[in-house]
Amino acid sequence: AAMPVPVPVGVLRLPRGPEGSSRGFSPTSPRFQALLGGPAAAQGVRAALRERYLRGLAAARGRSTRFCLRAGVCVEAVFGAADVAAVAFQVDALRTPLGVQAAALLRCTDVLAYSFLL
Amino acid sequence: MNDWQMKSPLDWEKYVNKMVKVAAVEKHEYEGWVLTVDPVSASVVLATFLENEKVSISVVLGHAVQEVEILKEGDDEMKQRLSCIFVPEESKVYSPEELEKRKNDLKTWLEANHIPVTEQGESGRTLCVVGVLTIDPPYGPEECSSSNEIILSRVQGLIQGYLERHQ
């Protein structure tokens, strides 16, 4: 008797991590280490620091922001969003020597500092 | 990852509410009051108070930080000031008594300035000005409605000035 044709099993693909090559948290990253549960006191402080930082990002949203990139290059744009792993910033109306880009991503590794007025 | 990024949250916390000088790569320097250090990217968030009551926020990305030097400790007043910077404006909720008082105060002030005003709607909660403009609770410029743009603009300006002086 012929063997029944096996039913293909769906392959579950995990999303790529922010680094692009991995499949989730890098096990050596401080974020993952913190997730495993360091000392309780450090966790509380970590949460408080992060909350303030996230509120800062919320305050930046929609504001004209100056980004200092490498080699003395500075660009202005309207702050859009930041991703959770600090890989990139999304901005609107990025002013470049070639014109204004309606929307753009700035890699965090390219940005040295950014500032805005409240 | 540089030394700064390798620090623990307890280390970073020591810099919060202090005036610091951040030395960054490519010889950049930043000074300001530390609002926080992001534990994910180790970015330092600095606040500088400008003359025109505006605050300048600078964020130095963790990977660019070479050294952070503490210049000054913030006193309680500064700590309080810094903690309020990112707090979103709270939408105020008024009690029925507060709303009634706001309405009556505004009505009295409008009448004192010879502006015809009546109360209408359920329990008289809406003020009607000159018969063409209505003001709903909580009786601010945003709560004014009218099909007459000129009167709307004028009354909004009056109420704005009134609230600024009387609050």
Image: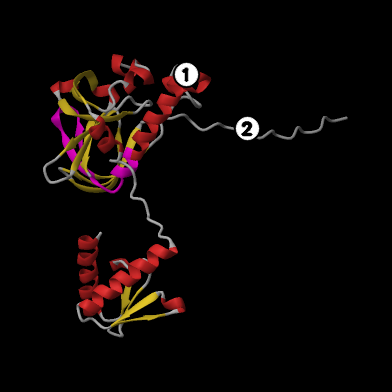
Magenta segment, which residues?
A56-77
The residue drawn where x is 51% and y is 33% is A15
Indicate the chain on which mark 1 is placed.
A
Which residue bears the numbered disc 2? A11
The residue drawn where x is 30% and y is 75% is B107
Are dots 2 and 1 in contact, CB under 8 Å? no
- Please tell me whether mark 1 sits on a helix, a strand or a loop: helix
Amino acid on which disc 2 is placed: Val
Which residue bears the numbered disc 1? A33
The correct choice, above or below, for B22 with respect to A69 in the image is above
Pick the residue in front: B28 or B119.
B119
The correct choice, above or below, for B10 with respect to A68 in the image is above
The answer to whether residue B144 is left or right of residue A73 is right
Indicate the chain on which mark 2 is placed.
A
The residue drawn where x is 51% and y is 20% is A37
> What crowding class fits label 1: few (fewer than 14 Cα within 10 Å), some (14-19), or many (20 or more)?
few
Counting from the top left corner in percent of width and height, residue B96 is at 44, 64
Taking the magenta stretch, the answer to whether it contains residue B160 is: no
- Please tell me whether mark 2 sits on a helix, a strand or a loop: loop
User: Is circle 2 on the same chain as circle 1?
Assistant: yes
Counting from the top left corner in percent of width and height, residue B13 is at 33, 23
